[in-house]
Image (cartoon, helix red, strand yellow):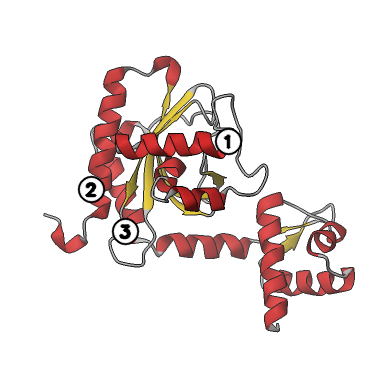
Amino acid sequence: MSAPAVTRAAAILGSLADEGPLTLTEIARVHGLAKSSTLNLCVALEEAGLVRRTPEGAWTLGRRTVELGGAYVRGFDVVREFYDFTASHPVLSHELLQLVLRHQRDVVYLARHEGRAPLPLSASIGDRFPASVTAVGTALLARLDDTEIRRLYAEPHSLAIWTERSPTSVEALLEKLHATRERGYAVDDRETHPQVYGVAMVVPARRAGDEPFSVGCSLMLPTLTEEQLISAREGLAELRDHLAAPLEMRG
């Protein structure tokens, strides 16, 4: 493929990841391409295993994307360390935990530990959720200054509103981020789901130039106690410090 063709092919993959199965006509319309050019690109991606045709004739992501995604995640030592630590921790081993990276206005889930039954709207590995309503996303957004936040959410309707407690304006989001910085950790107080409370902390990058991660814990509000919340928060702090420490500094 030529460089422009690669760019268009990557855009098609992005659309299929975001929207799910799309017909040839829909793909062509979204990207402003001729149907003949779109078909050529889809066939090339199909030959590479990156897309496949559904029985209904639409196009969707292929198995090769799963293999590539798995290889990408395995490239992070922190993912393996996340699983090892959470599985053996006396408190966190019984909780629902996530490890994420931020991509623009979303967070991408790299790993999750299920110490009990999943909660409503639990994310799977590879899922993208809005950063502004999740605790893990709020923790990462709080690292940005107000100018960067205003730029990131400058477009109309760029804020996701999932419940009546989700921030509905940039000013409301900024207020939440200011509180997060003062508190030292982020919370999702029924912003993603009316019965879910989340707490999260940033894992600083180990090396200059690396992206920081965020670790979070999701808790069920009807049964949540203050003792459970404190224990989860303390456990998250231990996990954060463990993942942030260079391997050679660990005892």
Label 1 is placed on what type of residue? Ser
Label 2 is placed on what type of residue? Asp
Residue 158 picture quarter:
top right
* Of 172 and 1, the residue lying toward us: 172
Mark 1: which secondary structure? loop
Q: Which residue is mark 1?
A: 169
Q: Which residue is mark 3?
A: 205
Q: What x and y, as percent, mark residue 238?
A: 22, 42
Residue 246, visible in the rendered structure: yes
Separation of residues labelled 1 and 3 (CA atoms)? 30 Å
Q: Relative to 37, is 93 on the left or the right?
A: left
Residue 114, visible in the rendered structure: no
Q: Relative to 117, is 194 on the left or the right?
A: right
Q: Relative to 206, is 42 on the left or the right?
A: right
Q: Is residue 113 above or below residue 228?
A: below
Residue 65 picture quarter:
bottom right
Residue at image location 87% in from the left, 59% down from the top: 25
Q: Tag 3 or tag 1, which sits nearer the N-term?
A: 1
Disc on res. 241? 2
